Amino acid sequence: MTSKALLAASLTLVLLAGCRSQSALTPQQADGQHLYASRCAHCHKENDLALKPPPPNLSNLFHHAKLPSGAPATDAQVVRTVLSGKGNMPSFAGRFTQEQMDALLAYLHTGVR
Ligand code: HEC
């Protein structure tokens, strides 16, 4: 199955499940969720460094046309931000394999459930 077909199939599953449970995450999304929890959430959710202003909430990131900064909410822009860093956000260049980056994006596309 191609990844698009897989995505379509999993979206159908999510719809059938009524977006109720985390178990509706695909294995790829679940990998991304793990990466997000270990590498991003401590800032973006917990703001453990007490940054001011606080890092933006990444929930439903791709459900709007623009990112909090006003940049377009596209995969390319998010990948660029993660690889280059931005303001108080460090660069993650060389930290993720392509597979991990794809998983992270797949999870961000779920709206960060
Ligand atoms: C050390 C804290 C920290 C970590 C870790 C961190 N970020 Fe950020 N992130 C920030 C801050 C602060 C901003 C706001 C930067 C700005 O606009 O100046 C930001 C902004 C962003 C933005 C929005 C950019 C925009 O244009 O609005 C995205 C997307 C993002 N981060 C994704 C991630 C992802 C994905 C991870 C995990 C791989 C991550 N961040 C890890 C602090 C962090």
Image: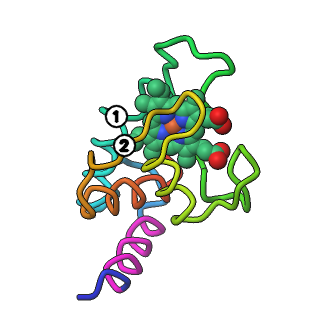
Q: CA distance from mark 2 to mark 1?
A: 9 Å
Q: Which residue is mark 2?
A: 92
Q: Using the rendered image of the protein, determine whether residue 57 is visible from the camera's viewpoint.
A: no
- What percent of the width, then of the height, locates residue 54? 63, 22
Q: Quadrant of the N terminus?
A: bottom left
Q: Of callouts 2 and 1, which one flags the residue occurring earlier in the amino acid sequence?
A: 1
- What percent of the width, then of the height, locates residue 59? 57, 43
Q: Pointers 2 and 1 in contact (CB under 8 A)?
A: yes
> Which disc, if any, is residue 58?
none
In this picture, residue 33 sits left or right of residue 113: left
> Which disc, if any, is residue 39?
1
- What percent of the width, then of the height, locates residue 104? 37, 53
Q: Nearer the viewer, residue 24 or 77?
A: 77
What's the magenta region? 5-16
Instruction: State the residue at coordinates (60%, 58%).
Output: 62
Within 10 Å of disc 2 (Cα), the crowding (few <14, some 14-19, many 20+) is some
Instruction: State the residue at coordinates (41%, 80%).
Output: 8
The verdict on label 2 being within 8 Å of ligand 1 is yes
Q: Is residue 88 above or below residue 98?
A: above
Within 10 Å of disc 1 (Cα), the crowding (few <14, some 14-19, many 20+) is few
Q: Secondary structure at mark 2?
A: loop
Which of the two marks, 2 or 1, is nearer to us in this view?
2
| Circle 1: residue type | Arg
| Circle 2: residue type | Phe
Q: Does the segment drawn in magenta span residue 15?
A: yes
Q: Predominant secondary structure in magenta?
A: helix
